[in-house]
Amino acid sequence: MKVEALYVHPIKSCAALPVQEARVTARGLEHDRRWMVTNDEGEFLTQRTLPEMALIHVTIDGERFTVRRDGQPPLFLPFVHDDGARLDVEVWGDRMQAVRHEHGSDWFSRVLGGRVQLVCMPDDVRRDVDRDYARDGDIVSFADGFPVLVVTRASLEALGDGIDVRRFRPNVVVAGAAAWAEDEWRALDVGALTLRTPKPCARCTIPGVDPDSAAITKEPLRTLAKLRTRDNQALFGINAIPDGEGVIRVGDPVVAR
């Protein structure tokens, strides 16, 4: 097995950014989901209710992010923004502090056609991973629940031909495993780094959003629900927690435990 692809999502629920290598930190891949869009109450917003977020692209340009959507002037953001008003924000019931970015909030409000806020998780804010699956010290950014999401190419192909892996918002795509082999994994050695894999990922409606057009489609969720429903949840991919820090690269060998 090997790493086929790596993706970072600098702003939660905006377009995925493919990378050839990534530094893995306690929170997950560096830059992954440190920024987030919320409503006025600080509740996170995603493609579940705003599918057009898929059309907002983020690139790394030197020491900053450039955020673009067709027809709009670009937005420039630092990697981490910690100089501003702090507010309480919420992700799936977890409450934490974030820093509001004023110009970014105005840009996203204009682009998304409604009043929203753009916030960043500063370095001193720690959000714990669910203690049912984690160890002391395991933390996560604004991701739904875990620092890293791993999927396999074979499991994706089991859902049908031509499905874009970006629909599932992975960080690491593994080639060379059998379909659904991830059900048996307890940990992965990726290059010199170890990722614990405590539980499969329950999927929401976002895989039904076309990453290139933001159109809502029935597939792959319809097939996934037929093949992979447990306890009324459709499952795809496996959540992971890094043991330590390091760099992983496309092409790195992967060994399952």
Image (spheres, rainbow, N blue to C red):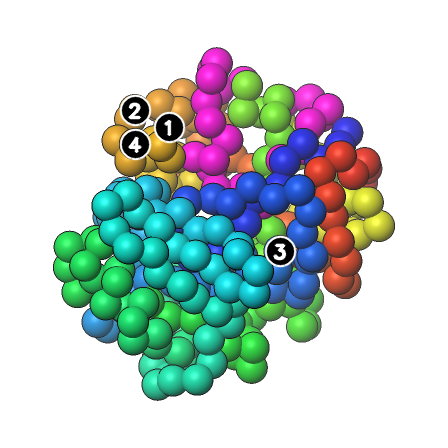
Residue 221: mark: 1
- Overall secondary structure of the magenta stretch? loop
User: Of the residues under marks 3 and 4, which one precedes in the sequence?
Assistant: 3
Cα separation, mark 3 vs mark 4, equals 26 Å
Residue at figure coordinates x 73%, y 43% from the top left: 249
List the single residue furthest toward the top: 161
Give the residue pinned by disc 3. 29
Q: Is residue 62 left or right of residue 194?
A: left
Q: Is residue 188 above or below residue 218?
A: below
Give the residue pinned by disc 4. 213
Q: How many residues crowd around disc 2 within 10 Å: few (fewer than 14), some, or many (20 or more)? A: few
First to last magenta residue range: 158-179
Q: Nearer the viewer, residue 91 or 58?
A: 58
Callout 4 touching callout 2 (CB < 8 Å): no
**Residue 228 location, x and y as percent?**
48, 28
Amino acid of disc 2: Lys
